[in-house]
Image (cartoon, grey):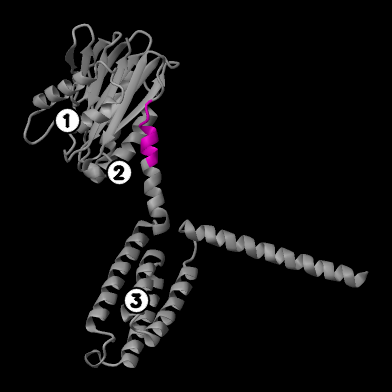
Amino acid sequence: MGSRAGVDSHVARLRKGAHRARIGLRRSGVDYFRGEGSDWVAFAGLLLMIPAITCGTLVNPVWCAPAALVLPIVAGGLLLRPASLLGLYAAAAGALIIESLVLGPYPRSGVAVTPGTVLVVAACGLFGLLIAQFRARVGVPWRRGGTMLFDLRERIRVQSALPRLPKGWHREMALRPAGGQSFSGDFVVAARTNGGRTLEVLLTDVSGKGMDAGSRALLLSGAFGGLLGSLPPHGFLPAANGYLLRQDWDEGFATSIHLVLDLESGDYELLSAGHLPALQLHAGSGRWEEKAAEGPLLGVYDGAEFHPVKGSLRPGDVLMLFTDGLVEAADRDIAEGIDRLTGEADRYVASGFEGAAWHLIEACAKDVNDDRALLLISRQA
């Protein structure tokens, strides 16, 4: 009985040890792919690739050329830290020396280590080292860098989503960054306040375009989204202006238009910070009216005042908010761009503007090298 108990306890200890090892390996793997763990596993694997490639080159240089050493070098630039990368480069340099000695001088051999091979390997190593140093300086490993950018893009998309509106209302928004990029200097934040009776929407155009303005737009969209609905409507733009001034950016101004819409009566107020006027289609007359509120750019000076303009959406009316990339171009002024936009929008009156936002950008500013955003809110007849 005593020997059997000893065997059972020994098996139990082995199981516990195996369980701890498995948990430790799993944690190290998770840390590695999150970019927080050591790179010794990747370094060891890539280091073993170098003698394997070298042996393959010496045995059959036709199928395994000396330039194949760029494979672990390129992978090392993506996976390793700069200190480990230098060790990998030293091993690759030693492998090239061995290959050149065994294969002989390149003028007398059909397959040998030529100066071009050395230059290719060295150039790949230089690019890999620059990439590794950039990652180390930023603090975001390649395994998480793309995931982080994707997550930021999705957060912007979710934050820009318009809330559901009650029956009888239609809303849609289209956003097109400059150059086909994923990040834009134009953004929208919206919320239903006052117990869901009021819709507040803010359309902002940050100075710059594309990736240059995307980082500032990301910061401002989070801040403005927190302010929207937390302050009285007339207090929002002054608070946003103060926030932008405190950032002290070299190129820190922005334009915004703030819509406060009563979803029961259809009455609304527009407050503008240097933004283009909104356009309202009156269903009775079939004409578009510009609704221009007064106010300076955000982030220019403190104590700015913003004066609203009021209006009302009747059944069949449409309100359109947009940024300057949609109507402004080098070969035309803003007035001509607005005329073209309203002319294209008239085609969607019969369909109730279903899916019109994307098509209007496509028709009016398809190839414009600027961020474009369009917001449509209609009260169905």
265 lies left or right of 105: right
x and y percentages locating residue 125 in the rendered image: 31, 72
x and y percentages locating residue 302 in the rendered image: 23, 29
Q: Sequence-wise, which precedes: disc 3 or disc 1?
A: 3
Q: Residue furthest left?
A: 331
Neighbour class for label 3 at 10 Å: few (<14), some, many (≥20)? some
Give the amino acid at mark 2: Ser
Q: Sequence-wise, which precedes: disc 2 or disc 3?
A: 3
Task: Indicate which label's residue lies in the foreground, 1 or 2.
Answer: 1
**Dot 2 lies on which element?**
loop
Task: Indicate which label's residue lies in the foreground, 2 or 3.
Answer: 3
229 lies left or right of 296: right
Nearer-the-camera pick, 264 or 307: 264
Residue 358 is drawn in which quadrant?
top left
Neighbour class for label 1 at 10 Å: few (<14), some, many (≥20)? many
How many numbered marks are there?
A: 3
**Dot 3 lies on which element?**
helix
**Segment tinted magenta in the rendering:** 154-162
The residue that label 1 is drawn on is 364
Q: Sequence-wise, which precedes: disc 1 or disc 2?
A: 2
x and y percentages locating residue 287 in the rendered image: 17, 12
The residue that label 3 is drawn on is 68
* 158 within the magenta span: yes
Q: Residue at x 41, y 72 (%)?
A: 84
Looking at the image, do the residues carrying marks 2 and 3 touch, with CB atoms under 8 Å apart? no
The residue that label 2 is drawn on is 182
Q: What is the spatial separation of the Cα atoms under label 3 and label 1, in whole angstroms?
A: 51 Å
**Dot 1 lies on which element?**
helix
Query: Which quadrant is the C terminus positioned in?
Result: top left
